Image (cartoon, helix red, strand yellow):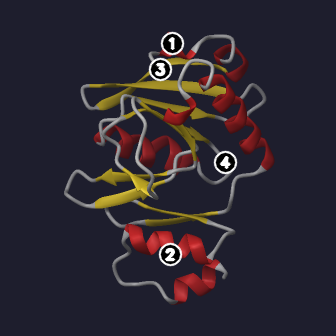
Amino acid sequence: MSAEAVGRHMPPVVTLDDLTAMMAADEHHRYEISPEGALSIMPPPGYDHAIIATRLMVWLATGVPVERIAQAVGLRIPGRTGGLGGRIPDLVVWNKIQSNGVWLPVADVLLVIEIISPGSEGIDTVTKRSEYAAAGIPQYWIVDQDSTQTVTMHVLTDGHYTARATMPLAWVLNTTPSEHELS
């Protein structure tokens, strides 16, 4: 099913169950919703994006049990005014193993990583950054798909993210996850 076909059957208020059904009907797109109800429809990530995610996943697995790391899993994002959104970060690290589900809670999340794709800059660097901070996620990393695959590591301080470090992905891969409080 195409995004247009899904759109013709859009309910007036989209829930996380609706998003799950939309993704099942349209394997060519990712669907996310902000806690305020703004729907985002994105194409699947490209090859370079997938390679960056795989490199980070392998690196994370050197210091974090693989059962606590996931790619492209849905998170329930509570809003500041009581709404509930659903985001699908590129990588998530938890402090304990999670139960199976499509939209998991953020309570045990240690780190969320977003790899910026063309067209996702605003959502990844502003919108999701604000939502993840409001949800209390301790670390948020953004990876640019520039020539050095720049990683900007944000840490939650007083309810807002501050940049702790910015470095090429190759430098990150020469550290250990425990150096970033991820063991």
Q: CA distance from mark 2 to mark 4?
A: 24 Å
Which residue shows up at 38% across the image and 41% down it?
132
Which is more N-terminal, label 4 or label 2?
2
At x 54% / y 83%, what residue is drawn? 7
Q: Which residue is mark 3?
A: 182
Q: How many marks?
A: 4
What amino acid type is highlighted by mark number 1?
A: Ser
Kind of element beneath mark 4: loop
Sequence-first disc among 2 and 3: 2
* Left or right: 52 as drawn, with respect to 39: right
Residue 146 lies, in percent from the top left, at 73, 33
Badge 2 element: helix
* Residue type indicated by callout 4: Ser
The residue shown at (64%, 66%) is 29
* Gap in angstroms between the C-alphas marked 1 and 3: 5 Å
Q: Is residue 62 left or right of residue 149?
A: left
